[in-house]
Amino acid sequence: MLSFAVMTAVLHAQEPAKARPHFLPEVNLGGMPYCQIELAVTPEELRRGLMDRAYLAEDGGMLFFYGTPKFTAFWMKNTLLPLDVIFLDAQGVVLQVTTMPVEPPRRTAETEEAYERRLKSYSCPRPVTSALEIKAGRAMELGLEPGTQIPELALRALLQNIIAN
């Protein structure tokens, strides 16, 4: 749980609104500190995700924060690293964990539309408030499975979103 001092420090951070990317304060995932979780909130950040990234730190990831529950789907368009996507509700409860392998890149003669059509879509059958992408296989290593609660993740995402806007 976040202490009052940490919440106050986060709320009073003096970052300019355009300073991107925004990272969450350290979050504990399955007993491991994660210090490099980037927050995706804007339509562009949510659309782009971890595309074209050749590296992701062991304690890194991206939290897609929607604010209100919604149905959403992920794909591995232009994504160079295999990822686990962890779908969460507003209380930070894990609803589903899915491993997403790297897709073959767009072929030379392939149109953008044809490339997008062949990509597999990964979704949760329930509405989610956020989704966390981390290195593939880490969710299992950390014991993150449906029913696991990560309440500080939901709270920190909410606080960081308030600061970013």
Image: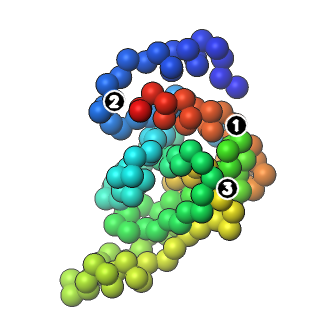
Tell me: 96 left or right of 162: right
Where is residue 75? Give x, y as percent.
Answer: 46, 68
Q: Quadrant of the C terminus?
A: top left
At a point 68% along the width and 49% down the height, the residue shown is 89
Q: Is residue 106 above or below residue 126?
A: below
Residue matched to label 3: 140
At a point 33% along the width and 36% down the height, the residue shown is 20
In the image, farthest residue toward the bottom: 109
Q: Are marks 1 and 3 in contact (CB under 8 Å)?
A: no
| Label 3 residue SS | helix
Count of labels in the image: 3
| Label 1 residue SS | helix
User: Within 10 angstroms of label 2, few (less than 14), some, or many (20 or more) residues?
Assistant: few
Q: CA distance from mark 3 to mark 2?
A: 35 Å
Where is residue 21? Give x, y as percent.
Answer: 35, 38
User: Within 10 angstroms of label 1, few (less than 14), some, or many (20 or more) residues?
Assistant: some
What kind of residue is marked 1? Pro
What kind of residue is marked 2? Ala
Residue matched to label 1: 151
Tell me: 11 left or right of 46: right
In the image, farthest residue toward the top: 5
Residue 47 can be seen in this image: yes
Q: Quadrant of residue 114?
A: bottom left
In the image, farthest residue toward the right: 147
- Of the residues under marks 1 and 3, which one precedes in the sequence? 3
Q: CA distance from mark 2 to mark 1?
A: 26 Å
**Residue 17: numbered disc:** 2
Q: Comparing marks 3 and 2, which lies closer to the viewer?
A: 2
| Label 2 residue SS | loop
Residue 50 can be seen in this image: no
At a point 51% along the width and 73% down the height, the residue shown is 121
Judging depth in this view, the residue of 4 and 17 nearest the camera is: 17
